Structure formats: structure tokens, C-alpha cells
Image (cartoon, coloured by chain):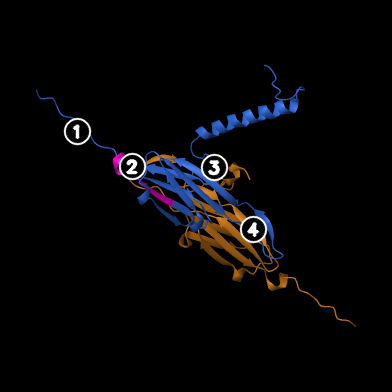
Chain colours: A orange, B blue
Amino acid sequence: MTAKELRKKEAEAPTHVERSEQCPVFVPPVDIRESVSDVVLLADMPGVDENNVDVDLEGDVLTIRGHGEETTPQGHSLNYREYRSGNYERSFTLSRDIDREAVTAVMKNGVLRLTLPKAKEAQPKRITVKAG
Amino acid sequence: MMWQVPGGTYWNPFGELARVNREMSRLADAFRGVQGIDAGDFPAASMWTNEDQTLMTVELPDVNPEELDITVKDTVLTLRGKREEEALGENEKYIRQERGTGSFVRSFSLPHRVDSEKVSAEYRNGILYLTLPRRDMDKPRKIAVKADTA
């Protein structure tokens, strides 16, 4: 992984949409892992606590938004700044086999963990074969 | 321009290409460096100073604060740590993996010497906040100028 990939990326607004916020919006890097029973999404959002994160599910589109804490201290002069604080936003399209009612979200150490359980119908069933 | 072939009698055109490539990327890095906002290193940090102290914030999501190793020697602060990769469960697979993992070490040059007894560090919401007080003897002193009334 190169250093460039480790940097925060600024979110692109969809074409013909202008942002109304003053602060920058970043795309959080995510890991998505799938098992037989659920899909887990991990998103890095440093500076965001559990009260400043929103997870919305509209139709098939899951959107995560985080409001980052402003870290600029008062009464100090800036020596250098390698990152900016700002908001985070990213959307994902869900497949139909997710149990929407059972989605859970946990925020810890600047990482959002979403657990998206698969619907019972979508989970593989083992069929035992009996000897005739 | 003379081709320099260390330890070989034949000129290797690919070696020369590699050298040009290295030079070019070094040049590109130098240009990126002057743009200021991102030095491209992990973790990204910002630093502020006033007369009494230096404050630093470091973006470090998903790190165990107990495993962070912060040392200050003279005017150099060194930060070591590790971002662990969570092991995959049975039958679990990655669909997307964008978050980096592994060890990191980074040193920062501070604008003054630090009273290492009074350094404090706090880890909150994936950001490390460091307070590095100046040593008393390094604090700036106001020098009064007397008017020569004679």
C-alpha cells in the first residue's frame, strides 16, 4: 500500500450538486467482509464519536455520515498541518438479502462497525441426505 | 554524459532506466512536499505552538492506545505503534479492503525542548492529542529596553 492510498480522500459531490457546507467532506476508507451469516463494514472516521455519526438506509442505499471534531486549539500558532478535520460521507448499495431491521452500528476509536445480518432466506441451508 | 557501470563491464540499459525513474519520482516527491497540506506519511499529524507549549494531533483510528510508544528526546518526538488486522472468521472473506494495517514509526522535530515529565497524551475517537510543555529555561523571555535618559 503506498503512502498516497493512506491519505484521506475528499469526497466528490455528484455532478450538478453543490455542497452547502463550509468544511471539507472526506470519503472514509472501508473494509467490507462477508461471512455466511452477515456482512461487516468497517469505516475509518477519526474524530467522530457515537453522537456525531448517522447511518441512513433509504431503499437499497446505505449512507454513513460523520461529523468530525474540530481539533484546532485556541491561542496557538500553526506549525504545520498534514490533515484537515471535516465530515465524512459515503454511500453503498445493499443487496436485497440483508435483514434491514437487524442492522447494528458501533463506534469505537474512530472506527464505525456496521453489522448487516443476512436474511434467513438468503443463508445457505444444509440438506442432509438420508440413506433410502 | 558518461554511463557509470559499477562492478560490471556491460552497460545495462534497464539499470539506467531505473535510475531515471528513481530521479523522476524523487522530483515528484519534492513537488508534493511543497504543497504543504499532506506530507504523505502515516499517521498524519498537525502541530501548533505558543509560548508555553506545543500541541499535536495525530489521526490514528483503530489503535490500541496502550500499545502506542511515544518517546521525546531533545527536540525529537518519536511515535511507534501498530494497527492490527482483525483476523477473518471461518468462511469469511474480504469484499473490499481499503484500510491499511501494520506497524508504523514516525519522528517529528519539535520547535523547542520539552519538559518530558509534564508531557501528556490522550487518545479520543481515533485521534491522539499530545501536549508538550516547553522547559522553563527554554521559555521566551521579555527583555526590557531601558531608555538612556542621560
Residue closest to the far bottom: A132
Label 1, secondary structure: give it.
loop
Label 3, secondary structure: give it.
loop
Cα gap from disc 3 to disc 1, whole angstroms: 43 Å
- Image height of B137 relative to A55, above or below: above
Cα gap from disc 2 to disc 3, whole angstroms: 25 Å
Q: Which mark is residue A32?
A: 4
Front of the two marks 3 and 4? 3
Frontmost residue, B84 versus A20: B84
- Residue B96 position by quadrant: bottom right
**Which quarter of the image is occupied by the C terminus of chain B?**
top left
Label 4, secondary structure: give it.
strand
- The picture places residue B118, in percent across and down from the top left corner, at 35, 51
Callout 4, which amino acid? Ile
- The picture places residue A126, in percent across and down from the top left corner, at 78, 74
- Left or right, A121 with respect to B135, comes to right
Stretch of the chain drawn in magenta? B129-138
- Image height of A18 relative to A38, above or below: above
Residue closest to the far top: B1
Callout 2, which amino acid? Asn
Frontmost residue, A71 versus B44: B44
Q: Which residue is mark 1?
A: B144
Cα gap from disc 2 to disc 1, whole angstroms: 21 Å
Query: Same chain, marks 4 and 2?
Result: no
Label 2, secondary structure: give it.
loop
| Chain ID, mark 4 | A
Front of the two marks 4 and 2? 2
- The picture places residue A69, in percent across and down from the top left corner, at 44, 53
